[in-house]
Amino acid sequence: MEELDLLKKDWKKQEANQPKLSYNDIDNMMLKKSSSLVKWVFYVSLLELGFGIAIVLLALLIQPDILNDSSMPSWLNWFFYATSAVVFYFIYKFYINYKKISTTSSIKDLMKNIMVTRRTVKHYVMYSLSVIAFTVCIAVPTGYIEGAGGMEVYSAEATLSQNLILAIATIIAACLVVAVFYGVYYLLYGLLTKKLKTNYKELQQLKSLK
């Protein structure tokens, strides 16, 4: 019994020496953690944009007249401009989300902003994968047409087997490319939003204790 009493006394001494955190201290820690995660989401989106711009510039260096190519339908240029505008919009939203979380002072607002940020990232990834799939579906038939000397595909002039083979090849290529980019997006954004989700759950528990 004496040994047990001694152990209890030692434990109480150690507990007394440990720093005690108030709810405000924990709030501030969670706020800084969440703000840092959203800031990284914003930085990653900027890096992705810079990578995309580098690819476009490289393509223009290799083929300077690509934008003036008369064989390309004009709607592809408009599609490129519209896609770029949407990407800039999402980057703006990431920045706004970061600013909101950095200036949040209550758990309720912080939880709300975390959910908004996760939703924005989800929509951005879905949009990007849709654009990638659409681009592949345009690029594969176009490459086939050029390789076949301008032969018509997906039309009555092409045989059923040619149309079928091209359709299957396009679907497979789109699925493979989307799968690769999904993995990349998961590493870039998925892990960050997963941590934000963990923060959200911890904030829920903290809110219930108050």
Image (cartoon, rainbow, N blue to C red):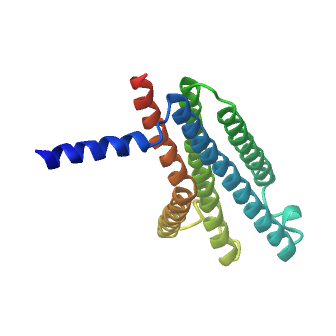
Q: Residue at x 55, y 28 (%)?
A: 112
Q: Residue at x 61, y 62 (%)?
A: 136
Q: Image height check: is 60 above or below 130?
A: below
In the rendering, at what x and y percent does residue 78 appear?
79, 48
Q: Is residue 4 left or right of residue 15?
A: left
Q: Quadrant of residue 62?
A: bottom right
Tell me the quarter of the image containing the C terminus: top left
Q: Is residue 68 left or right of residue 203?
A: right
Q: Residue at x 51, y 52 (%)?
A: 190
Q: Quadrant of residue 119?
A: top right
Q: Nearer the viewer, residue 9 or 181?
A: 9
In the rendering, at what x and y percent does residue 194 appear?
48, 48
Q: Residue at x 68, y 32 (%)?
A: 100
Q: Is residue 204 left or right of residue 130?
A: left
Please state the total of marks drawn on the protein image: 0
In the rendering, at what x and y percent does residue 29 appear?
56, 40
Q: Nearer the viewer, residue 25 or 81?
A: 25
Q: Quadrant of residue 107?
A: top right
In the rendering, at what x and y percent does residue 21 appear?
49, 35
Q: Nearer the viewer, residue 27 or 46?
A: 27
As drawn, the residue found furthest toward the left would be 1
Q: Image height check: is 197 above or below 133?
A: above
Q: Nearer the viewer, residue 48 or 2?
A: 2
Tell me the quarter of the image containing the N terminus: top left
Q: Image height check: is 162 above or below 208?
A: below
As drawn, the residue found furthest toward the top would be 210
As drawn, the residue found furthest toward the front would be 2
